[in-house]
């Protein structure tokens, strides 16, 4: 199962040098990762772990980001999702580069927040 979205980097997402805050990028990764996990589980999910995350190249103001999340493992109640963030200069349509990559783990939950099996 997969989920993806596009996001433009604005000045409020960056430090004084124009590079995106890591927390901004991680937030996008977590959001899109949860979409992929919930689609696969067909249940609400919560984030339980953020594995290794590698910031390969800087993301700058004006970059268009494509966040792609794929479920790579399903356990009894948990799902592991690989998330990749690609950047390209906005409006130029070329120069797409893998900027960040990481792995997040989610757990399927019921309406009280208790873990439930994934079908």
Image (spheres, rainbow, N blue to C red):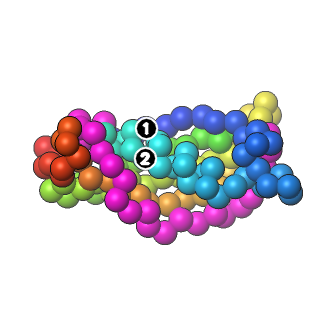
| Residue at image point 33% right, 49% down | 46
**Magenta segment range?**
39-62
Q: Quadrant of the C terminus?
A: top left
The count of marks equals: 2
Label 1 Cα neighbours within 10 Å, binned few <14 / some 14-19 / many ≥20: some
- Label 2 or label 1, whichever comes before in sequence order: 1
Q: Is residue 41 left or right of residue 101?
A: left
Most extreme residue toward the top is 91
| Residue at image point 20% right, 38% down | 111
Residue 95 seen: no
Nearer the observer: mark 2 or 1; the answer is: 2
Q: Residue 73, how many percent across, how many down?
A: 28, 57
Tag 1, which secondary structure? Answer: strand
Q: Is residue 72 left or right of residue 7?
A: left
Front residue of 118/108: it is 108
Q: Is residue 114 magenta?
A: no
Tag 2, which secondary structure? Answer: helix
Q: Quadrant of the N terminus?
A: top left
Give the answer, above or below, for where 38 lies relative to 105: above
Residue 77 picture quarter: bottom left
**Which residue, given by chain and number where applicable, does mark 2 sit on?**
33
| Residue at image point 44% right, 67% down | 51
Residue 11 seen: yes
Q: Residue 47, how many percent across, how many down?
A: 37, 53
**Which residue, given by chain and number where applicable, does mark 1 sit on?**
3
Q: Residue 18, how many percent across, how many down?
A: 83, 52
Q: Is residue 50 magenta?
A: yes
| Residue at image point 44% right, 63% down | 50
| Residue contact between numbered discs 2 and 1, judged by CB atoms under 8 Å | yes
Give the answer, above or below, for where 53 lies relative to 69: below
């Amino acid at each position: 199962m997969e989920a993806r979205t596009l996001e433009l980097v604005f000045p409020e997402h960056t430090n004084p040098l124009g590079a995106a805050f890591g927390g901004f990028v991680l937030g996008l990764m977590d959001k899109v990762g949860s979409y992929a996990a919930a689609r696969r589980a067909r249940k609400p999910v919560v984030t339980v772990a953020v594995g290794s995350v590698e910031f390969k190249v800087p993301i700058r103001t004006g970059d268009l980001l494509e966040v792609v999340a794929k479920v790579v493992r399903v356990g009894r109640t948990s799902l592991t999702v690989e998330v990749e963030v690609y950047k390209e200069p906005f409006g130029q349509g070329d120069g797409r580069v893998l900027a960040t990559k990481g792995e997040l783990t989610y757990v399927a939950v019921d309406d009280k927040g208790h873990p439930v099996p994934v079908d």
